[in-house]
Amino acid sequence: MNKSRNRSIWTGIGVFLLAKFKWAFALLKWTKFGGTFITMMVSMGAYAAIYGWKFGLAIVYLLFVHEMGHIIAAKRKGVKTSPAFFIPFVGALISLKERPKDAATEAYLAYGGPLAGLISFLPAVALYQATEDPFWAVVIFVGAMLNLFNLIPVTPLDGGRIVSVLSTKIWLIGLLILGAFVVISPSPILILIAIVGLFSWWNRGKEGYRNAVYAYEKQKLSEFREEISRWPNLTSTWELKQALSAKAAVAREAAQKDTGRLIPYLNDEGRIAREQVKMDEHFANQTLTLLQEWEHQPVEYEESDPSRPIPSHLLTGAIRHAADRISLLNEELEQNRAYYEAPASLKWKVLAAYLLLAGALSLFMLYGHRLMELYR
């Protein structure tokens, strides 16, 4: 009865404040941290309505410190982020305004959250020892559990971003762990995380395949650029047209054969070969079409001097377009190849830090659970 009465009182206070100070909330929406404050209050009210104001305050505090750990880590690395945003019964999050320069930086940002989360509930340990109030045992357990859950090695959770420095293949282990949680205790949030994690693993699994395709496209563009640059010196294009037609025919026949599957990490060689023959056909046809167009273009001369031919705008445009595409491919390849590279010494440090944090959180979760058992 008292609990229901307290909820009514807090609800009444909240309605009064919203009515009297709604102008202040409207103003906060336009400030940098207005969204954080408003969503924090909404989340606190939602938790308080079901579990009481003490637990509502505690859970929002734990989530806030966790997100502040990410923000502080991002500031130390010079990565811009959004303010924290709270979602009732889901948690809180921040978004990165730019991609970290490498996976090691991303892991550093991710590690900051659970580490700050560990620190956040340590005062509850001291308060329990001083008061033996079971509420602090709940705070210890919930704080440890929330941050330990975040260390499951699957994206978008912090654990998945941390272990990406070691190997993104570990994400599959995280998916299996998360899948077990979904089976044991299905919930929309767990299912959503599992779906996002599956797509992340799938895309990462295809990255090696994409890099190989990009590299082959770059090679074909270089050959294409060199080929058309020598055309003005040809005395006849008959043999060249015959060779290009033959290449296109061979590639077309090879492209009709299915040589690959769509499962990441499996049979990438066959899938790459299939894309290569498709590109062979594409570039052979493109080169042949360009050659035929160029042949029908009249030759222009500077000041009508036959010894001073003007370079074909058709060919120079094609060469420039190929050079631009090669530049883009170089940037993409460099970013993809370098992002997950890290020295062995750093990988060992990341692994040790991950295991130590996971171990500490596990011990505190068991400790909090044991304390709660005393009051059942």
Image: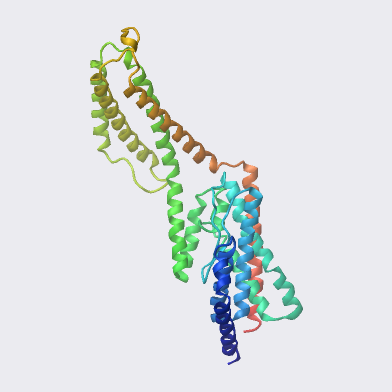
Residue at image point 56% right, 69% down: 38
Q: Is residue 370 above or below residue 234?
A: below
Say whether residue 11 is left or right of residue 268. Answer: right
* Position of the C terminus by quadrant: bottom right
Residue 272 seen: yes
Residue 339: image location, x then y, percent: 54, 42
| 292 or 188: nearer the viewer | 292
Residue at image point 35% right, 39% down: 270
Say whether residue 336 is left or right of residue 250. Answer: right
Residue at image point 67% right, 69% down: 121
Q: Tell how many labels.
A: 0
Residue 146: image location, x then y, percent: 58, 67
- Quarter occupied by residue 7: bottom right
Q: Is residue 64 above or below residue 322?
A: below
Residue 186: image location, x then y, percent: 45, 70
Q: Is residue 126 above or below residue 116?
A: below
| 253 or 285: nearer the viewer | 285
